[in-house]
Amino acid sequence: MDKKRFISELKQGDIVEGIYVVIKARLGTSKNGPYWDLEFQDKTGRITGKIWHPLSDNYKEIKEDSFVKIKGHVDNFRENLQVIVNEFDYANEEEINLDELIPSSDPPPEQLIIELENLCFENLKFKPWRRLCGLILNDNYIRQRLMMLPAAINVHHVYRGGLLEHTLSVCKLSLDIAKNYKDVDREIILVGALLHDIGKIKEYEGNISYNVTDSGRLLGHIILGLSMIDPYINKVKGLDEDLILHLKHIIASHHGEYEFGSPKRPKTKEAFIVHVADNVDAKIAMMSLATEGLEEKGENWSRYMKFLERKIFKPSHTNEFLEQNESPKKRSFEECLLPLKE
């Protein structure tokens, strides 16, 4: 079945027919009988849905994170859109297009992983660093989870490939900052940026919706990351213990301050650069998310953002005024001459 319309395009009264992901499914009870309270997702967003009695009796169980074919219409309930489902069935594997159903990074993860590999290849001249990064990025489990997982559950880069997109961005930002300082170790900065969030591979679980694992809750991604890299370090010859210690310090201190869950504060220039790059990328991503869609609403201020502890303003962009002031008329040679003193 071809999906005819994305969730972001739906309006009251629209007919819905297509494949979606069931993110949440709860069986409730009303005066008319039991009903299913659902939440559907595609790559553009989410919308609630209802299967009312007596149709709800046909479904003793609805699995979350499942792909389903539905037919129905869009209703408005208390100023919120919802889908009233008339037909419901599970989709076959050959009907499922993940690119349409799961929010993903742009560019897609498959492109980002190649860009990250090229960045390491071009900037790492020290063979032990190249060997370490190659071993980690070519580990099939790590590679697949990097391309699948978000960078956070609720805060920033919350989509497929978000962890990879954030990692690549922190690598680029770190290298750009390092260009300003001749005496910093650019290579360990890049390796530290690459591995700073590697522990999130074991902190998060899921392929569609994401949760924190038990080890994530009990240890956190920084401790998990430090333990994850040891087996790969042990396979690399010629990696001095001082370099290993410095790399682990960069990972351990990348949250910057104790109140932000950092076991240690940055005590080298390289560690501080990675911390700043990580913080900048996360904060800018939060601000972008906060101001998304404001223009369509004719608004300039976002709602209050808990993690930023403020509302975010979306200002006018200089480019808007450049376009207004650009004139197709070419200036004559005489207009370009400066006035001469007599």
Image (tube, helix red, strand yellow):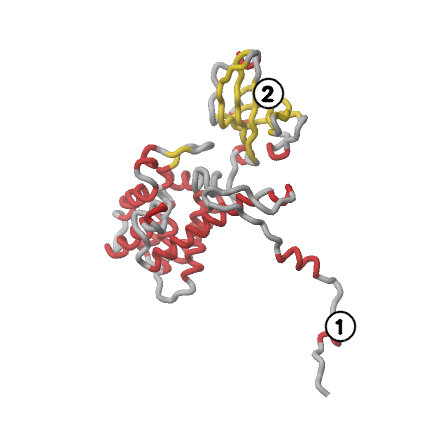
Whether residue 128 sits left or right of residue 165 in the image: it is left
Quadrant, the N terminus: top right
Whether residue 138 sits left or right of residue 109 in the image: it is left
Q: Which mark is residue 85?
A: 2
Q: Which amino acid does the dot numbered 2 rest on? A: Val
Q: Position of residue 69 (x, y in %)?
A: 57, 23
| Residue found at the very far bottom of the displayed protein | 342
Asked if residue 187 is positioned above or below residue 29 in the image, the reply reads: below
Residue at 43% across, 33% down:
210
Residue at 39% across, 65% down:
181
Q: Observer-nearest residue: 101 or 97?
A: 101
Asked if residue 229 is positioned above or below residue 78 in the image, the reply reads: below
Q: Which residue is mark 1?
A: 332
Q: Observer-nearest residue: 57 or 106?
A: 57
Q: Which amino acid does the dot numbered 1 rest on? A: Ser
Residue at 54% across, 36% down:
99
Q: Tell me the CA gap for discs 2 and 1.
A: 67 Å
Q: Tell me which label, 2 or 1, sits earlier in the chain.
A: 2
Asked if residue 129 is positioned above or below residue 179 in the image, the reply reads: above
Quadrant, the C terminus: bottom right
Whether residue 275 sits left or right of residue 85 in the image: it is left
Q: Position of residue 164 (x, y in %)?
A: 44, 45
Q: Observer-nearest residue: 64 or 132?
A: 64
Q: Position of residue 260 (x, y in %)?
A: 36, 46
Residue at 47% across, 22% down:
63
Q: Is residue 1 visible?
A: no
Q: Residues within 10 Å of mark 2 (few under 14, many from 20)?
A: many
| Number of marks present in the image shown | 2
Q: Is residue 244 visible?
A: yes
Q: Residues within 10 Å of mark 1 (few under 14, many from 20)?
A: few
| Residue found at the very far left of the displayed protein | 241
